[in-house]
Amino acid sequence: QVQLVESGGGLVQPGGSLRLSCAASGRIRSINGMGWYRQGPGKTRELVAAITSSARTNYADSVKARFTISGDLAKNTVYLQMNSLKPEDTAVYYCYADLRLITGGGRLSTSWGQGTQVTVSS
């Protein structure tokens, strides 16, 4: 059993900043990577940012100049610093972890958080 808990979402003004946090817990043998997806109203889900256990990062082009992903995967945590927020960033942000379980024969799995709402509005 693995649980991911996100925090830090909320309502902010355009141009503002927000920092999202995600913590994973449970029967985790190892984490290969963590990151964030988002889904805005009427839009498809998209990968926002990802970080691997070797600290390599990847960003969507739309956020590359404004967002920074960081984490301590040994502590099962990942963060997303969001600056210069735009109304287009409004979405539910979902944390994920690409991991190997202790149970179930050490199977590879992807676990998801419940999502945290980010609303950017004037």
Image (spheres, rainbow, N blue to C red):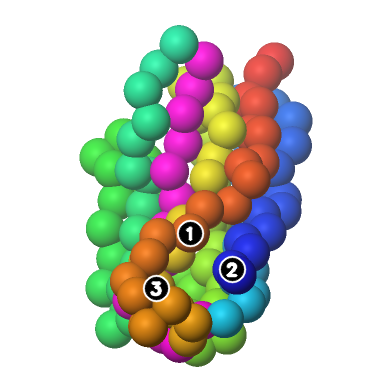
First of labels 1, 3 by sequence position:
3
Q: In the figure, is residue 42 to the left or right of 9? A: left
The amino acid type of the residue labelled 1 equals Ser
Image height of 108 relative to 67, above or below: below
**Residue 39's x, y, as percent?**
47, 29
Tell me where residue 99 sits by quadrant.
Answer: bottom left
Q: What number is the disc on residue 86?
A: none
Circle 3 SS class: strand
**Residue 91's x, y, as percent?**
55, 28
Q: Nearer the viewer, residue 44 or 78?
A: 44
What residue does disc 1 label? 111
The amino acid type of the residue labelled 2 equals Val
The amino acid type of the residue labelled 3 equals Leu
What residue does disc 3 label? 99
Image height of 117 relative to 18, above or below: above
Res. 33 in view? no
Image height of 33 relative to 73, above or below: above
What residue does disc 2 label? 2
Q: Nearer the viewer, residue 85 or 31?
A: 31
Distance in Å between CA atoms under marks 3 and 2: 10 Å
The answer to whether mark 3 and mark 2 are in CB contact below 8 A is yes
Distance in Å between CA atoms under marks 1 and 3: 8 Å
